[in-house]
Amino acid sequence: MAEFAQLARTMAVECPALRVRQASRVLAKLFDDELAPFGLLSSQLPVIATAALFGDSGAPMNKLAQALLMDRTTLTRSIRPLERAGLLRVARSPEDARTKIVVITRSGERMIETIFPVWKRVLEQIKKPLGAEMLTDLHARLDRVIALSRVAERGAPSSDGALSNEGRGGLRSSKTPYKG
């Protein structure tokens, strides 16, 4: 049991995914607290902002998912409440009825304009203790981590030949069951 505890301790201390998730929770809470009066979560803000970047023609669902580094199922779940709130609209593509297009609505555009000062205030709350230089460095380092998504997208097989399902919210699928 002592060996197990040491392994767990090593994982808890050295795992970059754990650290990033902890940092993400801290940042999400700061933004969530300020966005709550607007009925938004910090996880919804990137969806609205990224959809807005595609302009009036909107974003095909798969391109929006790629831009956000999300799978389509998670993106669909994220869009539903934003669509109900009238901030986004999902429509069929005029070129291909099988393709769904996500378009920011005028209400969504006004929401971005309304919450921008709040977003900026939270950013300043983060920048103050970290410093502008450290925040810039953090962005650069996170960009390098995000670049790993190209490696993850390749679906590198594991040692037993099964594809990793890690990035899709589940345990790794495998032909050989876990024998723990």
Image (cartoon, rainbow, N blue to C red):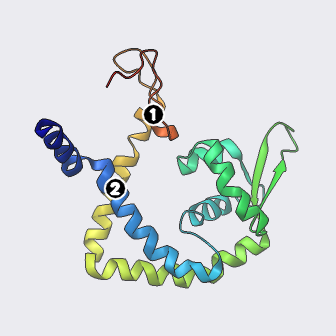
Please say if 26 is above or below 95.
Answer: below
Q: How many marks?
A: 2
Identify which amino acid the numbered label 2 is placed on: Val
Q: Earlier in the sequence, mark 2 or mark 1?
A: 2
- Whether residues under marks 2 and 1 lie with C-beta atoms below 8 angstroms apart, the answer is no
Please say if 1 is above or below 61.
Answer: above
Q: Residue furthest front?
A: 1
The residues tagged by marks 2 and 1 sit, at their Cα atoms, a distance apart of: 19 Å
Q: Secondary structure at mark 2?
A: helix
Please say if 1 is above or below 37.
Answer: above
Identify which amino acid the numbered label 1 is placed on: Leu
Residue 162: x, y in percent?
A: 44, 19
Q: Nearer the viewer, mark 2 or mark 1?
A: 1
The residue at which mark 1 appears reads as: 171
Q: Secondary structure at mark 1?
A: loop
**Label 1 Cα neighbours within 10 Å, binned few <14 / some 14-19 / many ≥20:** few
| Quadrant housing residue 159 | top left
Q: Residue at x 31, y 69 (%)?
A: 135
Question: In the depicted view, which residue is nearer to us: 165 or 104?
Answer: 165
Question: In the depicted view, which residue is nearer to us: 126 or 56?
Answer: 126
Would residue 128 appear left or right of 166 to someone viewing this image?
left
Would residue 62 appear left or right of 4 to someone viewing this image?
right
**Label 2 Cα neighbours within 10 Å, binned few <14 / some 14-19 / many ≥20:** few
Please state, as top left, top right, bottom left or bottom right, where the C terminus lies in the image: top left
Q: Residue at x 71, y 64 (%)?
A: 82
Would residue 29 appear left or right of 1 to someone viewing this image?
right
The residue at which mark 2 appears reads as: 20
| Quadrant housing residue 125 | bottom left
Q: Residue at x 38, y 69 (%)?
A: 26
Please state, as top left, top right, bottom left or bottom right, where the N terminus lies in the image: top left
Residue 12: x, y in percent?
A: 23, 49
